[in-house]
Amino acid sequence: MMKKYDIIEINDLNLFYGDTQALKDISVNIKSNSVTALIGPSGCGKSSFLKSLNRMNDLVPIAKTTGEVMLDDKDIFEQGYDIVALRKRVGMVFQKPNPFPFSIYDNVAYGPRVHGVKNKKRLDEIVEKSLKQAALWDEVSDRLKDSAMGLSGGQQQRLCIARVLAVEPGVILMDEPTSALDPIATLKVEDLIHELKKEFTIVIVTHNMQQAARISDETAFFLMGEIIEFEKTSDLFENPKDKRTEDYITGRFG
Amino acid sequence: MQKKKLLKKIASYGVEKLFLLSACVAVLALLVIGVYILVSGLPGMFKIGVGQFLFGEKWSPSEGYYGILTMIIASLAATIGAAVIGVGIGVPTAVFLADIAPKWAVRILRPAVELLAGIPSVVYGYFGLVVLVPFISNTFGGAGNSLLAIIIILGIMILPTIINLSELAIRAVPRSFVEGSLGLGASRMQTFLRVSLPSAKSGITASIILGVGRAIGETMAVILVAGNTPQIPGSILDSVRTLTINIAFEMSYASGIHREALFATGVVLFAIIMILNFTLQAVLNRKAGTRKRRRAGVKPR
């Protein structure tokens, strides 16, 4: 396996929606080829933090960011930073499966096509490789031309993961990717995440603490826009340093 | 207790049937009108001779000539022209309103479009008569009463239909599609062209069909600017008479075979609207189908 290094360095990140501060002085490093879980009660800023990492917050007109997010030694908030390249490098999987109303093939091929891949053979290869990586190939290989809307929720979510993999990102952000899925589909996605971390860096927001404990290497506990604790997952859950973390993971609030 | 239950059951039964009845009225109206036109128009068409009627170029009831080819051509030309203007301006406007426009622009544009829809057709016609016709006459020569004037007036008239329905269709595209696309590194333009527009396709198609239907059936606005000469237009500056004008102009005094010929004109108009709707739907659907097939990696037939 590749040697782990800090792939993203976040320094003094602050995020405002209008007058409301959603993130306060966040400074953490995210390690490559690992799974980082973000936990915390609703509205604590974990999703906002996730969306800062590929600048999806730009879609919110009143959002304002200060501080830096260093990816490959460059600040992604620097003026003139190539957002297209950023989102290609940092892919995102959403809470609700959101396949396009196209065929399965076209969903996976969408990203590469947008980025200029036209060769049909090359596209075929990418689609097959991505679907295999997303552990979906065996289920759909004989009906690639069928609409993606006909897949089950779990399959749709794995298709969305395949769609992200097709643009060959380095980092994959996941915003509660299993919250709309049943337990079996959830397990499949968790297994997949475990496989994917060999090649990718994964940051995942989850409301499910067992899930965070099962799949992540490191965990950040968010509260009111701040990171209260950021530790190795086993340490954070077995030996929380902060009283508030302990209260949260033992279910006393949140 | 038992009685109350029974009453409830009867009430619910009654309401259900009432709704069914209401639904039937619309269908019934269509049937009655359709049958009435066919019964009143078809015999006349056969008396004149179907070929003579549809392909005759001369319309002169006093001499016994009942050919409506000139009007069929005029109606089709006017509708196609109006559709070109309506779609060409309407769909981009809808895109602008739904996706691009800043809030203040929407606040001005949307009421403007709605107002446009509320203007009575006779006012459109009047505007055409006193502004557009003289303008065309001064700019291009001729009388000004022309196919061009009809096309412009109809094009403007169908704008609200196309803009409103297309905008609705584009706005109905789930935000998650857009986010998914942007999240993959697609630009806003790529996202719009490759995700939003294909997703809104059926709604936009419906808006065009409705617009075209309105254009071909429009009478009042057209009468005032057409010039009403039954001739095959050599250019868009020629005066023409559409099918609708023919009916509206002469129905009040026609009798006998003349009257039947006017009803037959109605039959033709009815048929053209049907055919136009079906072909438009088929063409737009097939186009989408081949694109989908091509995207899926299968050669189009």
Image (cartoon, coloured by chain):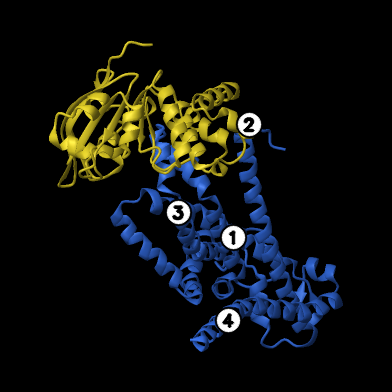
Chain colours: A yellow, B blue
Q: Of the residues under marks 1 and 2, which one precedes in the sequence?
A: 1
Q: Amino acid at mark 3?
A: Ala
Residue B147: image tag: none
Circles 3 and 1: CB atoms closer than 8 Å: no
Disc 3 on helix, strand or loop? loop
Q: Secondary structure at mark 2?
A: loop
- Residue under label 2: B297
Mark 2: which amino acid? Gly
Q: Percent position (x, y) of residue B211?
A: 55, 63
Disc sitting over residue B13 in the figure: 4
Return the residue at label 1.
B209
Q: Looking at the image, can residue A234 be seen?
A: yes
Q: Residue at x 56, y 85 (%)?
A: B10
Tell me the CA gap for discs 3 and 4. Answer: 36 Å
Q: Determine the image quadrant of residue B151.
A: bottom right
Q: CA distance from mark 3 to mark 2?
A: 28 Å
* Amino acid at circle 4: Tyr
**Labels 3 and 4: the sequence-earlier one:** 4
Mark 2, Cα crowd under 10 Å, few <14 / some 14-19 / many 20+, is: some
Q: Would residue A254 be found to the left or right of residue A182 on screen?
A: left
Q: Nearer the viewer, mark 1 or mark 4?
A: 4
Task: Give the image quarter of residue B154.
Answer: bottom right
Q: Reading the chain from its start, which is encountered first: label 4 or label 2?
A: 4
Provide residue B23's location: percent of width, then percent of height: 60, 76
* Tag 3–tag 4 contact (CB < 8 Å): no
Are the residues flagged by discs 1 and 4 in contact, CB closer than 8 Å?
Answer: no
Q: Quadrant of residue B81?
A: bottom right
